[in-house]
Image: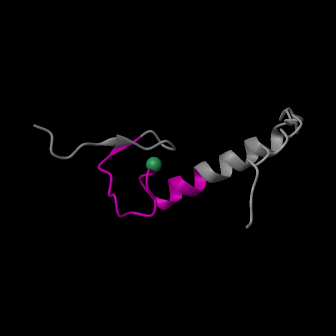
């Protein structure tokens, strides 16, 4: 039985018992959290800005005509 499941810290690869209430989750410590965040930012900055987001230029379908609204 393993009542204390360990997870691997994404930053330092250390196995640790996670504390679900910890704001550092899923990192083992705040240091690792910040380290990973920094790494992420640096990688993000290094990436070329590639706006390959295809814009949906679909013409909006005409609003379905309401069936003879009768306000009487
Ligand atoms: Zn760690």
Question: Extreme bottom residue here?
Answer: 72
Residue occupying the point 35% across, 42% down: 7
Please name the residue shown 34% across and 58% down the image. 20
Magenta span main SS: loop
Task: Give the residues drawn in magenta, as a range.
Answer: 14-35
Q: Is residue 9 left or right of residue 7?
A: right
| Rendered image quadrant of residue 21 | bottom left
Q: Is residue 22 magenta?
A: yes
The mark total stands at 0
Instruction: Say if the magenta span includes residue 34.
Output: yes
Can you give x and y, in whole percent of width and height, for residue 30 in the image? 49, 61
Tell which of 39 and 51 is nearer to you: 51
Q: Is residue 59 left or right of residue 67?
A: right
Question: Is 57 situated left or right of 42 in this image?
Answer: right
On the image, the x and y values in percent for residue 24 come to: 46, 59
Q: Name the image quarter holding residue 3.
A: top left
Residue 63 image point, x, y percent: 81, 45
> Observer-nearest residue: 48 or 42?
48
Judged from this view, the residue extending furthest toward the front is: 72
């Amino acid at each position: 039985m393993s009542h204390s499941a360990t997870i691997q810290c994404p930053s330092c690869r250390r196995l640790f018992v996670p504390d679900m209430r910890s704001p550092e989750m899923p990192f083992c410590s705040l240091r690792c959290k910040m380290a990973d965040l920094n790494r992420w930012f640096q990688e993000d900055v290094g990436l070329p800005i590639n706006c390959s987001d295809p814009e949906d230029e679909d013409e909006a379908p005409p609003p379905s005509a309401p069936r003879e609204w009768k306000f009487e």
